[in-house]
Image (tube, helix red, strand yellow):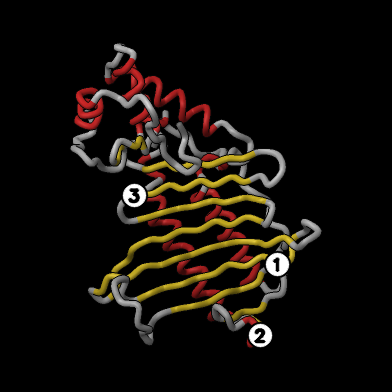
Amino acid sequence: MHSGSYYIVQREKRVPKEIMNRAMAEFGEKHPGGKNFWWGETHSIKGILTLATMLDGKYSRELVDELTNTTYKKLLDCSSIQSNVDFPFHSTHSSKMVKLYNVLAEYSNIVNPFGNKEFNLKEPIQYLDAVEVTLALKEGRNHYTRLTLSTNSSEAAFVDDEKGWFYDTIVLIQRNRTNGYINMGHYYSNGSDGRPVDEVVRLKYKVNKDNYDNHPNDIDLRISLKTGLAWQTYKEKQAELATDEQINVMITHLNICIKKIGNKIIRKMINL
C-alpha cells in the first residue's frame, strides 16, 4: 500500500525474502537497502516495477526500462509543468531591473526544462540514472505541482500551488579555494483573494558550505520586482530601493546558477 508520502510499504502477506533480495541486488543494494528499497519499503518507481515484474515472473531489465520510461513520460505529460508560469509583475523601475527580469525568464526555463519549448528532451530512461527526478501532483481544490531535478552537486525545484509559485536552485561553487554554495530563488505569493501580492528574487550565498557561522563575504539579498525594493531576510521593514550594484549582484549569481544547472543537470537531459 502507498504510505501517503513517497514510498510503498508492505502489509499482511510480504514479498518473499529471496525475491526482495533479488530486486535489491539489481540496484546494488543489500538489506536494509538504499535509495530504492529500505527495510522492505519501496522508494522508487523503477524499484516497484522491478519488484512487481519479479513477482509476476516476467522480469527483465529491458521490460523494466520500458515500463519506467512509459511511466515517467505519463507523469511528466501534465499541463502544470509543460509551460513555465507568467510573471505577474513586469519590472520597469530601471533599465537594470528590466535586465534582471529578462535573466529571470532564462532562469525559469533552466529550472523547469519541461516548460522550455526550445529544449529537445531525451526519453526519461536515458537520463534517470544521471538525474534524480521527483514529481508530485494534485489537481482540483488545494492543487499543487512539485518538481525537483537533482544530482550530487546541484538541485533545481519548481513548485506551483494555491499560495503562489517559486523556482529554486542550489549549486556548489568554489571561490578562493573555499567550497561554498548559492541558493537562488524566484517566487511570488498570493493573497487571501488568490491574487498576487508580491514577486521576489532572493539570493543566499555562503562562503563555506560546511560552516553555519556568518562570513564577511556571505550574501543575503532579496529584491521585489513589484516595488523595486531590496532587503535582507527578515529585515523587510528596513527595505530600500535596490541599487544598481545590488541588482548586478543578483544578475551575476543568477547567471552562475543558470550555467551550473545547465552543465550539471540539463545537459544530461537534452539531445545536443
Say what amino acid the circle numbered 1 marks.
Answer: Asp
Q: Pointer 2: what residue?
A: 237
Q: Callout 1: few (<14), some (14-19), or many (20+) C-alpha neighbours within 10 Å?
A: some
| Circles 2, 3 touching at the beta carbon (< 8 Å) | no
Residue 231, how many percent across, how many down? 59, 81
10 Å neighbourhood of mark 3: few (<14), some, or many (≥20)?
some
Compute the Cα span from label 1 to label 2: 15 Å
Closer to the N terminus: mark 2 or mark 3?
A: 3
Bin the neighbour count of mark 2 within 10 Å (Cα to Cα): few under 14, some 14-19, many 20 and up.
Answer: few
**Which residue carries the number 3 mark?**
151
Whether pointer 1 and pointer 2 mark residues with C-beta atoms closer than 8 Å, the reply is no
Q: Amino acid at mark 3?
A: Thr
Q: Position of residue 227 (x, y in %)?
A: 71, 74
Q: Earlier in the sequence, mark 1 or mark 2?
A: 1
Secondary structure of residue under mark 1: strand
Please identify the quarter of the rendering in which residue 19 is found. top left
